[in-house]
Image (spheres, helix red, strand yellow):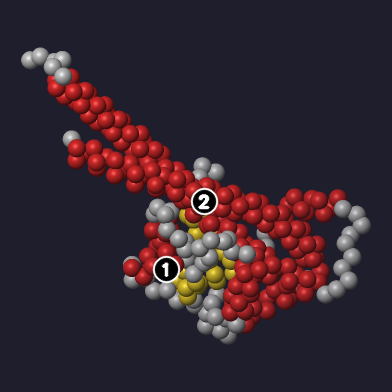
Amino acid sequence: MSQNFERAKSRLENISTIEPLLGALRTMSMGTWQLALNKIDKMNAYEDNYNHIITEILPYINKKTSKARESKEKDQKITDTIILLIGTERGLCGKFNEALIEQSISWLKEADLPSYQIWAMGSRLIRKLEQMKIDISWRQPMSASDLMTYQKAYLTTQKWVEQYEAYAFNQFFVLFNQSEKSGQYQFSSSKLLPYEFQRNEANQEQKSQRWPPPIIETDPTGIYSTIIQHHIAASFYKMTLKSAAAEHAARFNLMQEAKDNAEEIIEELRRIINSERKRKITQEMQELAAGAGLLHN
């Protein structure tokens, strides 16, 4: 019993030390999770503004310019599709990266692309892909402490747009996990390039009610090009935020579960220790009473 008592005391000390750390990690994950969700809401507002401007500009755009790439593509051999996977830089988020890889492989089988390149963001994801012997054509670590900034997203997508316009690839998809309201996550895929503007019927109705019409004093094509570049950056930025929200939600749930388990173990160990202490006290009292002749066989 003495060995069990000492083992229980040792376990209690160790788990009591770890339990506050689990709580701190849980709180940090919850904070970053909420921060990512708040940024997503703000980006939705920015995208609404971009859509509004594009809707105003489109009637002034020369439709021939939109067919320029199509005519040039006939003389180009473009077969590659870029598949970018957004994973995690840190661990303690369960099967987050494994689930992403598994769903991505299924997505690729259904897409049945003639050829593609796998790109990856996040050191943990990259390590998993390497372990599975999956070729990675481009890799990029992510910040382990901060969310990606819009500026970095814009500069990154600018390089991709330049490659796309130079006919390095013909389309660009982003695969990632996105958070749900329940705190769980689900696989998501989104086409980043070529950019496809979706007309918003609500904006069209609002436009018909506005008067007077907007005055455009500069080249509408230049405005359109600039807004599209920001729209692409905003779309990619939101994808990274959705992935980060899903990651931290998964980490929060795991840390909450681990903290609950730790508290249960601590309570059980305390019961064992208190029970053993009572047994020892009772035994000592019996020995004292026997030594004093108060107990008779």
In the picture, the quarter occupied by the C terminus is top left
Which sits in the foreground, 103 or 249? Answer: 249
Furthest-left residue in this view: 297
Q: Residue at x 41, y 44 (%)?
A: 19
Of the pair 58 and 267, the residue shown nearer to us: 267
Q: Amino acid at mark 1?
A: Ile
Circles 1, 2 touching at the beta carbon (< 8 Å): no
- CA neighbours of label 2 inside 10 A, class few (<14), some (14 to 19), many (20+): many
Q: Quadrant of residue 43?
A: bottom right
The amino acid type, in three-letter code, at marker 2 is: Ser
Q: Tag 2, which secondary structure?
A: helix
Name the residue: 40% across, 53% down: 94
Task: Report the front residue among 276 and 19.
Answer: 276
Q: Which residue is mark 2?
A: 29
The residue at which mark 1 appears reads as 126
Report helix, strand or loop for mark 1: helix
Tell me how far mark 1 sits from mark 2, CA to CA: 22 Å
Query: Which residue is at 53% across, 57% downward?
Result: 243
Q: Is residue 199 visible?
A: no
